[in-house]
Image: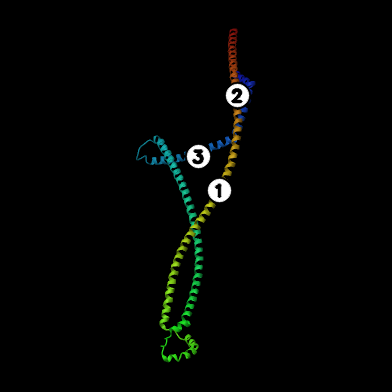
């Protein structure tokens, strides 16, 4: 026991062993410093999150297994089987079932996201079309209101003009001319008695002219004049109606064309606004991506520098470890030789001790 304590004390206080202990301590400190680096911490955090997720999944599977085990225990009176033998198939079946449900849920989620994006795009397009149509209808309504006001003003002017024409026509009808009144009178037959009255008739022509102006028209002439004016008015009205129909058709075509133009203009404006917003977003995203790319390039350079530094340190550590292994092997050889010598000395001492005891026994 004392010899073993002596050997341990000699080994601990050996200079090479102290050197190896110092190198081991420095290597442990270097290992601790490397563990405190940011990538190592991030990897440890990822490992911790993965472990937590696996533990959560394990607990869920364990819970489902317990529930199924309870159900199996309830049904054990009706169907005999070994729970230990059925545990593994049930756990595998549960795992496969959960995986299938997870895949199905992920597929449904992806399909729902795709359908939502498609519905969102269709809704946006439909909204743009409806807004364009609303804008065009509002402009068309405004144009129709303006057209209605203009039509009312035009109709009032036409009614006023027709009233004026009607008044002038009545004035013309009710005011006969001198020639018409002369020819409308019944001409007297020429006779010898009338020749003697020629001079008297010539003398009284001015008086007859004044009396003719006050003579009323016959009813037949009034009816003929009214019929002629009515026919002219009917022809003019038919022509005006045909022109009005053509005008309405042209205005309707122009209105539809204007409505279509307004709709296209509004749609073009919306598309331009959307394009401008998307271009601004794209420019902003491009700037962000460029900044992220520059940051990532800088991080890559830093990581490469750190990696090169770590590689050099690892190479140095490997060299140190290789030399330490060589020295350790040499120390082990020395220690084995020292141990053999000590054992040999111990055996010699034991033999001497036995020899001394034998001599003492002989002396006694």
Q: What is the residue that sits farthest to the left in this orientation?
A: 78
Element at badge 1? helix
Crowd band around label 3 with a 10 angstrom C-alpha radius: few (<14), some (14–19), many (20+): few
Image point 44% across, 43% down: which residue?
107
Residue 226 lies left or right of residue 328; in this view the side is left
Q: Are marks 3 and 1 in contact (CB under 8 Å)?
A: no
Crowd band around label 1 with a 10 angstrom C-alpha radius: few (<14), some (14–19), many (20+): few
Q: CA distance from mark 2 to mark 1?
A: 58 Å
Q: Nearer the viewer, residue 18 or 52?
A: 52
Q: Are marks 2 and 3 in contact (CB under 8 Å)?
A: no
Q: Which mark is residue 279?
A: 1
Dividing the picture into quadrants, the one containing residue 79 is top left
Image point 51% across, 56% down: which residue?
265
Question: Where does label 3 land, which residue?
Answer: 53
Q: CA distance from mark 3 to mark 1?
A: 41 Å
Q: Quadrant of the N terminus?
A: top right
Residue 258: x and y in percent read 49, 59
Colour mapping: rainbow
Residue 40: x and y in percent read 57, 34
Residue 52: x and y in percent read 51, 39
Image point 48% across, 50% down: which residue?
121
Q: Which mark is residue 94?
A: none
Q: Going from the N terminus, do you reach mark 2 or mark 1 first? A: 1
Q: CA distance from mark 2 to mark 3?
A: 40 Å
Residue 36 lies left or right of residue 170; in this view the side is right
Q: Going from the N terminus, do you reach mark 3 or mark 1 first? A: 3
Residue 119 lies left or right of residue 6; in this view the side is left
**Does 241 appear above or below 341?**
below
Q: How many marks?
A: 3
Question: Where does label 2 land, which residue?
Answer: 319
Crowd band around label 2 with a 10 angstrom C-alpha radius: few (<14), some (14–19), many (20+): few
């Amino acid at each position: 026991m004392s010899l073993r304590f002596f050997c341990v004390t000699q080994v601990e206080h050996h200079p090479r062993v102290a050197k190896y202990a110092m190198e081991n301590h420095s290597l442990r400190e270097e290992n601790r410093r490397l563990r405190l680096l940011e990538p190592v911490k991030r990897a440890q955090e990822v490992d911790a999150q993965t472990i937590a997720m696996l533990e959560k999944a394990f607990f869920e599977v364990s819970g489902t297994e317990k529930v199924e085990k309870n159900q199996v225990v309830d049904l054990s009176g009706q169907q005999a089987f070994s729970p230990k033998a059925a545990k593994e198939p049930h756990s595998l079946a549960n795992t496969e079932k959960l995986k299938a449900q997870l895949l199905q849920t992920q597929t449904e989620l992806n399909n729902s996201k795709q359908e939502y994006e498609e519905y969102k795009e269709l809704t946006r397009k439909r909204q743009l079309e409806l807004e364009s149509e609303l804008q065009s209808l509002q402009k068309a309504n405004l144009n129709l209101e303006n057209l209605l006001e203009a039509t009312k003003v035009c109709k009032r002017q036409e009614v006023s003009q027709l009233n004026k024409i009607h008044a002038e026509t009545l004035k013309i009808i009710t005011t006969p001319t001198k020639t018409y009144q002369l020819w409308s009178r019944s001409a007297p037959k020429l006779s010898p008695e009338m020749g003697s009255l020629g001079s008297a008739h010539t003398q009284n022509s001015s008086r007859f002219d004044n009396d003719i102006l006050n003579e009323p028209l016959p009813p037949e002439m009034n009816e003929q004049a009214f019929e002629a004016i009515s026919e002219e008015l009917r022809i003019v009205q038919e022509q005006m109606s045909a022109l009005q129909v053509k005008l309405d058709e042209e205005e309707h075509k122009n209105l539809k064309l204007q409505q279509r133009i307004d709709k296209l203009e509004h749609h073009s404006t919306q598309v331009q606004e959307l394009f401008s917003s998307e271009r601004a977003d794209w420019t902003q995203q491009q700037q962000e991506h460029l900044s992220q790319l520059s940051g990532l390039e800088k991080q890559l350079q830093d990581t490469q520098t750190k990696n090169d530094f770590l590689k050099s340190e690892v190479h140095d550590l490997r060299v140190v470890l290789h030399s330490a292994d060589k020295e350790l092997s040499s120390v082990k050889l020395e220690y084995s030789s020292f141990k053999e010598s000590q054992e040999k000395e111990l055996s010699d001492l034991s033999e001497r001790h036995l020899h001394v005891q034998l001599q003492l026994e002989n002396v006694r």
